[in-house]
Amino acid sequence: MIVIILAGGKATRMGKEKAIIKLGAEKRLIDPVIGAVNGALKADGFIVAVTKFTPQTALYCQSMNYRMIETPGYGYHADLRYLLTRYHEFISVACDIPFLQSEHIDALIDFYSEHHNSVSVTGAVPFNMVPDGINPLPFTYRGQKLVACGINAVMNSMHSLPLVFYDPLLAINVNTTSDLRVAMRYLYRYK
């Protein structure tokens, strides 16, 4: 399956384009995500979805020779609907989950395939595993409190199943400067 990295947000909370925020001297926030996608055995390459709100991200992706698609930029769900008009199914990955691993992507593709490609899949982490300093919006599935972690198998379906990853670092989705501080703390700890 093709992976589409969503990097077209309006940057209202961070004040700058998230995908190209520096993680240390060399890496940008999108770089570990692309590394994970490139290492996934079951992914058929990737496309970076940008918008008119992310011109610097587009320039960076162009300089790296990444394949891109421009979405309208009317919000997360609107952009997914737009992408579904071009791709029957795909893996969506947020550009701001620096602890994504290739194994997460492969596991999501396997889980999607096990369900005969008939339902969308939302990657999730148990709410009680979320690292301190991260304040996500939880949802409940069959009595378990979960947090979406920014990786999904997307298709035109009214139904979605969660795939639960027991990896607290996957719950770090950089949406605020506070989230970025938490991510940096863990990046330096696990370098």
Image: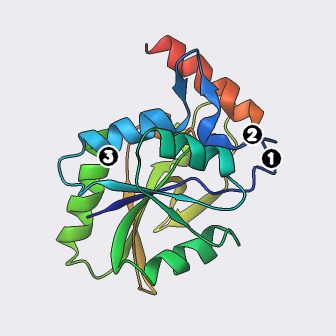
Amino acid type of the residue that numbered disc 1 sits on in the rendered structure:
Arg
Question: Given this view, does label 3 or label 1 mark the residue nearer the observer?
Answer: 1
Pointer 3 residue: 104
Label 3: which secondary element: helix
Do the CB atoms of the residues marked 1 and 2 lie less than 8 Å apart?
yes
C-alpha separation, residue under disc 3 versus residue under disc 1: 27 Å
| Label number found at residue 156 | none
Amino acid type of the residue that numbered disc 2 sits on in the rendered structure:
Thr
Residue 174 in percent (x, y) is at 64, 40
Residue 138 in percent (x, y) is at 62, 56
Q: Can residue 171 be seen in this view?
A: no
Crowding around mark 3 (Cα neighbors within 10 Å: few <14, some 14 to 19, many 20+) is many
C-alpha separation, residue under disc 3 versus residue under disc 2: 23 Å
| Label number found at residue 13 | 1
Residue 19 in percent (x, y) is at 60, 42
Q: Is residue 68 visible?
A: yes
User: Is 75 above or below relative to 125?
Assistant: below
User: Is 34 above or below relative to 160?
Assistant: above
Label 2: which secondary element: loop
Crowding around mark 2 (Cα neighbors within 10 Å: few <14, some 14 to 19, many 20+) is some
Residue at 41% x, 37% y is: 167
Q: Nearer the viewer, residue 37 or 119?
A: 37
Residue at 54% x, 20% y is: 186
Amino acid type of the residue that numbered disc 3 sits on in the rendered structure:
His
